[in-house]
Amino acid sequence: MQKLGCVIILRGDFMKAISIRQPWAWAIIYLGKNIENRNWPTRFRGTVAVHASGTMTRQGYELAQHFILKATEGRGKRLRVAPPEKLPYGAIIGLADIVDCVTESDSPWFVGEHGFVLKNRKRILEPITYRGALGLWNVPPGIERKLRQAT
């Protein structure tokens, strides 16, 4: 712990974020996608900021749209992904709690090696522009303050 004037900084006590390509980040916040698939595991449990990456390919969008339609087809209505030009990029768009990391799941969203199980997904009204990073990364204090005010 370090004390700077009236501010106390606790080392390692930063909100975490995870960058996710669109439209997957959008699906987490708006469609209830409850698994984030990764090829690496995590021991982290707690709230993360969901950051929509700054890039998306047309092919990636079309493959994701097909997958999302299949994953949500039993909900009584066919859900469509927002058009690419309406998706936010390079911004934090919401929060979710990582409650587990699994290697198998009955969720229609699970594919791959590891799935971060997500609960309590919450959107923010205005995306907060910020450059993301690989892996789980620390949200800078100024961005975290904006995020807490936005929820």
Image (cartoon, helix red, strand yellow):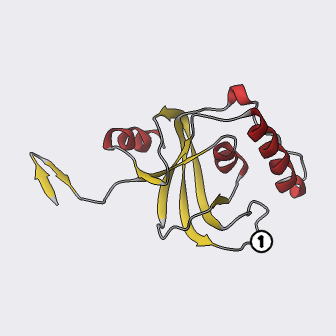
Coordinates of residue 15 in the picture (x, y in percent): 39, 53
Coordinates of residue 42 in the picture (x, y in percent): 51, 67
Image position of 114 (left or right of 31)? left
Quadrant housing residue 52: top right
87 versus 36 height, above or below: above
Coordinates of residue 31 in the picture (x, y in percent): 73, 48
Q: Could you tell me which quadrant the N terminus lies in?
A: bottom left
What type is the residue that disc 1 sits on? Asp
> Residue furthest toward the left?
5
User: Which residue occupies 55% across, 68% down?
Assistant: 41
| Label 1: element kind | loop
Coordinates of residue 119 in the picture (x, y in percent): 60, 61
User: Which residue occupies 41% across, 44% down?
Assistant: 148
Label 1 neighbour load within 10 Å: few <14, some 14-19, many 20+: few
102 versus 25 height, above or below: below
User: Which residue occupies 47% across, 66% down?
Assistant: 44
Q: How many marks?
A: 1
User: Which residue occupies 46% across, 36% down?
Assistant: 131
- Residue that label 1 marks: 106
